[in-house]
Each structure stands twice: as C-alpha cells, then as structure tokens.
Image (tube, rainbow, N blue to C red):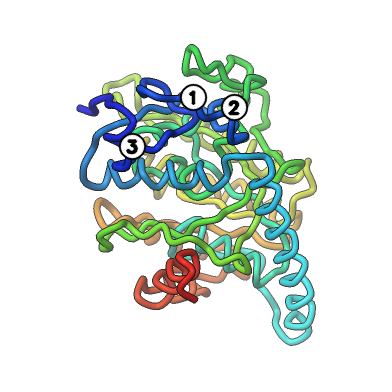
Amino acid sequence: MMALCGLAGFLGNGRKRNGYDDCEDDQGSEQDGSDVKNFGRRLHCHRCKGSVGRRMAVLDETLRELGTPEARKRFRTLAQDNLARWATEAQVKRVVVDLPRLRVERGDWGVVTHQLTKLYGKPFAVLNMANAYVAGGGYTEGMPAQEENMFRRTDCHFSIDSSCFDQSCDRYLPDHTDLLNARHGRVMLDAASPRVCVRGPEEREADDLGYAWLVDSEVFCFFELRAAAVDLRGGGSGFRFEDRECFRRIEAQLDTLIAGEVRHCVLSAFGCGAFMNPPQKVAECYRRALAPRLENFDCVAFAIFHPGYGPDNFVPFSSVLGQLDGAAVDSLGDAAHPPASAAAPAWRRFRNGEL
C-alpha cells in the first residue's frame, strides 16, 4: 500500500514541491509561477520503491519541467518548429517514396508516433485508451498502462481542467464520461491544442526505467484522441465482450477523426490490455470499420506494444489488419523500438549538459 509522506520523503532532498497535497510544505506555487495544481488529478507525495516509485518520480520530473505556462509555450514552439522542418524534409522524400495508407507497427505509442511524424511531416492524432471516469487513470499512482504512460511523457496533465474534471470528487464530469464512452457517436479529439511529448519510452530492463528526455530537436506534438473501451475486468456474465458495442466505439473514433479532418492517426489495441478485451475480436472490429473509411485517411497506423508479459497483441492485429489492401506490417522495424543503448543515453547526457 502506498504511504502518504512528508515532502522530503518523496523528493529525497527536502525541496519544496508545488501542486501536491498531503505534503508538509506546499507554499512555493505562488512564488515560482507553477500552476501544476490547477490541472489534472490532485497529486500526492508518496514513499514507494521499485517501478511504481520510479514512475511517480518520472511524473514529478515531467510536471516540474512543464510546470509554468512559459515552459509549456517553449516546448510547444520547439514542437512546431520541428514539425515545420520535418514537413520540408518529407516533401523531398515523398518524390521517391510511396508511403502506405495503413500500417501495423510493433512498438510504443510515442516512438511510433515520433517516427511517423518525421516520416510524413504531419501531426498525428494518437489514441489515448482512457479511463472513462478518472482523468489519466492511475498516472498519479505510478500505474503502467498506456494512458498513464502518455501522461508521464507529455503535457496531458495540463489539459485536464474544471471544464471536464472535478478535482474534489476525482471524477470526470458526466458529460465528459459520456463523450469518452462515445454515447453520441463521437469521442474527444483536441485538435485545437496539440499535446507535446518531451520524453522517450519506458525501458523495463533499465534500472531507471528509461523515460529519456527528448533533445529539443526531437520534441514533437500530437492531437489527443481520448476514448474509453469497455472494462471487462470485473468478470461474470455482466462483463462479457460485446462485438456490437466495441464496433460502435471504434466507429466513433474514426468518425470523430473524419469530422475533424484529421488524416493521420496512431491507434492501438483498444482495451486489450488492462481492460481485457479480446485482441482478435477488437482487430476484426477495426478492420470492418476501416474498410469503408480508409480513403478518408492518408495514414492509419496501429502501434502495438508488448510489455514483455501476457499475450502479444501484435500477432492478431497484424494478421487481421494485414488483410486490408496496401497494409504494411512492422515497416518501421528497429526504428519503432530502438535499443536503449543507442538512443537513451545520448538524450540523458544532453539534458544533463554533457553534450
């Protein structure tokens, strides 16, 4: 069980932290301009060890780095400048390269999106497989799923405000829950305020779990497509997979993108992790929904990540979606899952001022 603690117990150096509840000293937010506590879930100081504690520390580092409007503006500018450069480079490459419309890639959502943004020179919408009730799921508790991973590596925390989330109740407002559940045939797409990714993937084999800082020239933006799958974890007859409901929610994702005129997206094994939806059937739903809609997109990519335990969802997704005309499977290769020894240390040395 996580134990609430004083400030020094979490940070290890007794420094003041802003935006955190249940800390002995939380007086610095007015002085340094931090607005962390105005967004997202209420944050706590915890004393945890192992991977959970490290993930919580990563979140703390990210929120400190992005903790003021000025800091977030700087990273948005970096991402926009990088996108403009990649767009120019992509125009040159596209003269001789015919890029596939549908891709099934083996890799982390962020790494795949990063590579495709550079390759196509376009911002991608990225599916956040969201908790329908609690913003970011368990991101403040160091949980490992995709939504929590996204919140640790980006500025998503700062997109959660009182217009959609009640901090005191720790719940989304009912209208937002309905939106994430596609009650009216649409889900949440924030194309007006792109998110910015500033960190690399989790590396479970690394002592510090990775999360390398991206160098300024690699920071990238994306549109968050926030949608919830049916949670089947409860077991029993009331928690059986329903093909019609899954298909309805997937149609809502695609129709939301089409209505928003977003032609590049990164999707995933929707609900096939912690929510225990069957990957073969979910992939079939995507295939059926995409077949009549694929012409509305320039690139639909599936980033299928295998954490090293449980079934490998890449196998059913590549098999099912590979049946569609022109589909490319694992075409990014090693670029979608770079070895830690090649990329991460350089990023860390850069942030530490060693490069």
Q: Looking at the rendering, which quadrant does residue 140 occupy?
A: top left
Q: Are marks 1 and 2 in contact (CB under 8 Å)?
A: yes
Three-letter amino acid code at the position of disc 3: Gly
Residue 303 drawn above or below residue 95:
above
> Residue 58, how many percent across, how many down?
40, 47
Residue found at the far bottom of this picture: 96
Q: Nearer the viewer, residue 91 or 287?
A: 91
Residue underneath mark 1: 27
> Residue 312, how many percent across, how many down?
32, 57
Q: Earlier in the sequence, mark 3 or mark 2?
A: 3
Disc 3 crowd rating (10 Å Cα; few below 14, some 14-19, many 20+) is few
Residue underneath mark 2: 30
| Whole-number angstrom distance, CA of label 1 to CA of label 2 | 7 Å
Secondary structure type for disc 2? helix
> Residue 323, how many percent across, how many down?
53, 64
Q: Nearer the viewer, residue 112 or 47?
A: 47
Three-letter amino acid code at the position of disc 1: Gln
